[in-house]
């Protein structure tokens, strides 16, 4: 985290983590995320100022430290969120289990 250009805390009912931005790339890093049943996954979202979520990746392995490189840079996103889904979806089907502001 010391070499990151920006670090944003993410917290919620599933645990906690960080969104790190370095050289235009963004990474989600979490330790001890809640285990999910085999038929579910964590889906990662960037949400812009208009409130429109954009899917930027998934996580299925939550044993130990979970790391996922986001599929796009943070751009103008103001919020990062994680939902639990049965499969990758185009729009969230549940409330976020982790959320964090990408401002300030």
Image (cartoon, rainbow, N blue to C red):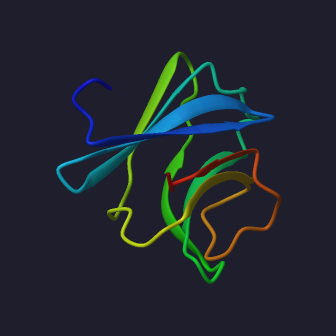
- In the picture, measured across the screen, residue 51 lies left or right of residue 46, that is right
- Rendered-image quadrant of the N terminus: top left
Q: Residue at x 34, y 65 (%)?
A: 72
Which residue does the image show at 76% across and 45% down from the upper left? 97
Q: Residue 47: x, y in percent?
A: 58, 69
* Viewer-side residue, 57 vs 75: 75
> What residue is rendered at 49% in x and 35% in y?
18
Q: Residue furthest bottom?
A: 50
Q: Up-down: is 68 above or below 79?
A: above
How many labels, in total?
0
Residue 90 position by quadrant: bottom right
Residue 48 vertical placement versus 101 (above, below): below
Q: Quadrant of residue 14?
A: top right
The residue lying toward the viewer, choosing from 78 and 99, is 78
- Give the camera-side residue of 62 and 96: 96
Q: Residue at x 72, y 27 (%)?
A: 34
| Residue 21: x %, y % from top left | 31, 46
Percent of width and height locating residue 43? 60, 54
Q: Position of residue 48 (x, y in %)?
A: 55, 75
| Image side of residue 25 versus residue 84, left or right | left
Decide which of 101, 27 is in the foreground and name it: 101
Classify 38 as above or below 55. Answer: above
Furthest residue toward left: 23
Residue lying farthest front? 104
């Amino acid at each position: 985290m010391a070499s990151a250009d920006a670090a944003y805390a993410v917290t919620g009912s599933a645990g906690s983590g960080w969104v790190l931005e370095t050289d235009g790339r963004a990474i989600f890093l979490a330790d001890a995320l809640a285990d999910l049943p085999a038929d579910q996954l964590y889906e990662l979202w960037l949400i812009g100022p208009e409130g429109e979520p954009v899917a930027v990746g998934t996580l299925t392995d939550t044993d130990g430290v979970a790391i996922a490189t986001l599929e796009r840079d943070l751009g103008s996103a103001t919020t990062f969120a994680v939902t639990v889904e049965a499969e990758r979806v185009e729009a969230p089907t549940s409330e976020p289990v982790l959320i964090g502001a990408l401002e300030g």
